[in-house]
Amino acid sequence: MVTEFLLFAFIAVLLGYIIFLHIQLAKKNIFIESTVKRLSGIEKSWNAEEMIRFLQEMKKDSYYSLFFTDKLFEEKPLEFLLENEKDSKIYIHYTKEKNDARNILKEGFRFADSFYKTAMPVTSDKLDLLIKHNGRKSFGKYLVILCLSCKIVEHYTAELNKKGLKNYFVENVLTIAPPFKNENADIVYQLSNKYVKGFIDYQTGEITRNPEYNPSYDSPEFEKNLEQLIQKA
């Protein structure tokens, strides 16, 4: 009898917990749908100040504030991230260790085979940024910002097309050291540190700037890189 009672109690608690989870999931779905409706069609025209005001409004609700516990969307970090958006291509990369972020500032950004494996493009589309940030922030609290001038990207994209190098991207050209193979036989490239704007500790909002940052940086070495890619093709 006691065993049956305990089993019944356990089932009741389990059912109650399932119902609770369904309610929480429904709330989150409503939140996401209402946010998308609110942002869709108008958010692309918002500037940083308008987006910050919207996020601050959302923070006032104790339930929704759980979605905005970090500092990335506060005024200074967000402006630092997006201030070159009109004339540059912006990418973000997450890392767990501050020393790793500092090394990227000093030495440049290393990537294996494809730049886009760990670097994500972002724009003034704040909803897209919010989704990408929430999906990747578990990889580390330091958000490294990579920024390339549109003119540089357009120039070397045209050069790659002109030379028939369709299997390569601009990031394979804008490197400062010869590519090499790692222990997994992947080809490792090192993007110049001139394209590393800095990094943000999104938990505190602290910004670290790269004094050597220059999104329009060009070098004779890049032409040599193109010639080497032709030889490999």
Image (spheres, rainbow, N blue to C red):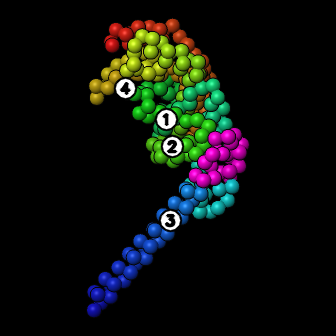
SS under mark 4: loop
> Who's the residue at 47% across and 71% down the image?
20
**Counting residues from the N terminus, which is met first, the one under dot 2 or under dot 4?**
4
Quadrant in which the C terminus appears: top left
Q: Amino acid at mark 4?
A: Asp
SS under mark 3: helix
Alpha carbon separation for disc pair 3 and 2: 22 Å
The range drawn in magenta is 36-56
Left/right placement of residue 5 relative to residue 18 reads left
**Labels 3 & 4 near each other (Cβ < 8 A):** no
Alpha carbon separation for disc pair 3 and 4: 41 Å
* Whether residue 66 is visible: no
- Residue 205 versus residue 66 in the image, above or below: above
Q: Amino acid at mark 2?
A: Lys
The residue beneath circle 3 is 26
Residue 120 shows which numbered tag? Answer: 1
Q: Amino acid at mark 1?
A: Met
SS under mark 1: strand
**Counting residues from the N terminus, which is met first, the one under dot 4 or under dot 1?**
4
> Who's the residue at 56% across and 42% down the image?
129
SS under mark 2: helix
**Labels 3 & 2 near each other (Cβ < 8 A):** no
Residue 132 shows which numbered tag? Answer: 2
